[in-house]
Image (tube, helix red, strand yellow):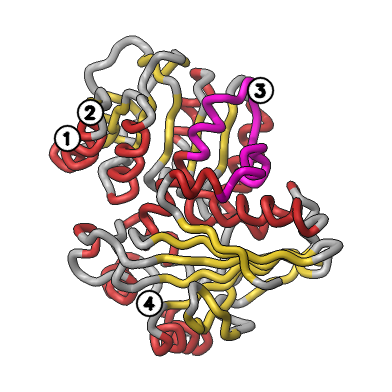
């Protein structure tokens, strides 16, 4: 699809028919933005369109099949204020459209290697518009909290993040696809040196939202971006389920190689069944939380939680990214931890119904 920048145009949610899209559409509608839901099926988009309209926003559907690389019924470029990628887009169709049209772009769906590739593409394109890569945990909320704490701790030389994944939470296919890479070893920076880490290695118990949670290492984009943006020399993010036996099961599946044997499309439904119960897209959400510990010249720690679940936290992270993107005047790559609004993060989150708690360092 050809797009052009129009500051009075709608915010287009590409793949916005899912759980996160519904909640982001509602949040954008409350802030007075016109919203367009782009995807293959208007029927699937009805809930998101209703969420935006229920919040008082103008909302419409745009047929856009990323596999076809074009939108039906539009010969002229479509005027939009921003594009938001809420669906896996391995062909970079949405990113390419944003770069060609000079449109601000927010992406929350890239795992680390694809985010690194996007950085290179944007740099080589001499982008005229901002590209906010907010694929880190919960639409960039985790690295935002790191940046907020770093200002108190005199830097972020060392960062530890710990996530509690609620198995009963509302979830869509793309959010589970992200977790589907749990069997893939990944590179991180530890003590200034690049290290290959096995998923669910280095397990430990951590207090998250008042509950002891067994967590192990997993791949997140902020472990790649924080050394670039905040000078972090040791970034570690761990995840665990609210059901400890499930965490131990995943660790065993990875350690024995069974998860690797279950890779590929043939076993996709089985893998996803472990992470998402039937009907989870229709749930309101289970309580979700994560904590961050930062060490600079001193230490600081805090956690973020929402009774409405991970989809709401992701939508809030995406909203903050959209706000920032719409206000940027320079082109190029931006990461959530670089947003100046992070100095006010707790108050911003409180306004959006998200809890922030300061913890003993």
Helix, strand or loop at label 4? It is loop
Residue 340: assigned label: none
**Of marks 1 and 4, which one's residue comes earlier in the chain?**
1
Residue 258 seen from this side: no
Residue 308 in picture, x, y percent from top left: 33, 59
Q: Quadrant of the N terminus?
A: top left
Which quarter of the figure has residue 16? top left
Q: How many marks?
A: 4
Residue at x 64% of width, y 24% of height: 331
- Report the magenta residues as a range: 320-346
Residue at x 24% of width, y 26% of height: 59
Marks 2, 4: nearer the viewer: 2
**Of marks 3 and 1, which one's residue comes earlier in the chain?**
1
**Of marks 2 and 1, which one's residue comes earlier in the chain?**
1
Pointer 2 and pointer 3: residues touching (CB < 8 Å)? no
Q: Quadrant of the C terminus?
A: bottom right
Q: Which residue is mark 1?
A: 42
**Of marks 2 and 4, which one's residue comes earlier in the chain?**
2
Q: Which residue is mark 3?
A: 330
Q: Which residue is mark 2?
A: 61
Placement of 137 over or under 245, stated as above or below: above
Q: Is residue 27 found left or right of 133 in the rendered image?
A: left
Residue 23 seen from this side: yes
């Amino acid at each position: 699809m050809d797009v052009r920048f129009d500051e009075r145009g709608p915010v287009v949610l590409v793949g916005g028919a899912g759980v996160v899209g519904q909640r982001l559409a509602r949040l954008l509608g409350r802030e007075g933005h016109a919203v367009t839901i782009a995807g293959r099926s208007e029927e699937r988009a009805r809930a998101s369109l209703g969420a935006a309209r229920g919040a008082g926003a103008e909302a419409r559907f745009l047929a856009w099949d990323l596999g076809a690389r074009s939108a039906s019924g539009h010969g002229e470029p479509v005027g939009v204020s921003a594009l938001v990628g809420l669906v896996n887009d391995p062909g970079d169709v949405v990113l390419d459209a944003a770069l060609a049209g000079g449109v601000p772009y927010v992406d929350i769906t890239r795992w680390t290697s694809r985010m690194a590739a996007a950085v290179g593409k944007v740099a080589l394109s001499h982008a005229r518009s901002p590209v906010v890569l907010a694929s880190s945990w919960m639409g960039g909320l985790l690295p935002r909290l790191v940046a907020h704490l770093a200002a108190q701790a005199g830097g972020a030389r060392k960062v530890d993040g710990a996530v509690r994944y609620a198995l009963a939470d509302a979830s869509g296919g793309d959010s589970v696809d992200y977790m589907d890479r749990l069997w893939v070893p990944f590179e991180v920076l530890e003590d200034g040196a690049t290290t290959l880490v096995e998923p669910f290695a280095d397990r430990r118990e951590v207090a998250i939202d008042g509950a002891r949670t067994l967590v192990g290492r997993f791949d997140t984009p902020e472990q790649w971006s924080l050394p670039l943006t905040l000078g972090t020399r040791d970034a570690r993010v761990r995840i665990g389920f609210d059901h400890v036996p499930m965490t131990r099961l995943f660790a065993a599946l990875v350690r024995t190689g069974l998860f690797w044997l279950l890779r590929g499309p043939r076993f996709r439904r089985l893998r996803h069944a472990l992470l998402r119960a039937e009907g989870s897209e229709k749930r309101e959400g289970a309580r979700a939380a994560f904590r961050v510990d930062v060490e600079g010249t001193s230490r600081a720690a805090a956690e973020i939680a929402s009774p409405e679940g991970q989809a709401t936290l992701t939508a809030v992270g995406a909203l903050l990214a959209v706000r920032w993107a719409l206000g940027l005047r320079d082109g190029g790559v931006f990461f959530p931890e670089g947003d100046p609004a992070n100095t006010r993060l707790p108050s911003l989150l409180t306004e959006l119904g998200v809890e922030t708690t300061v913890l003993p360092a």
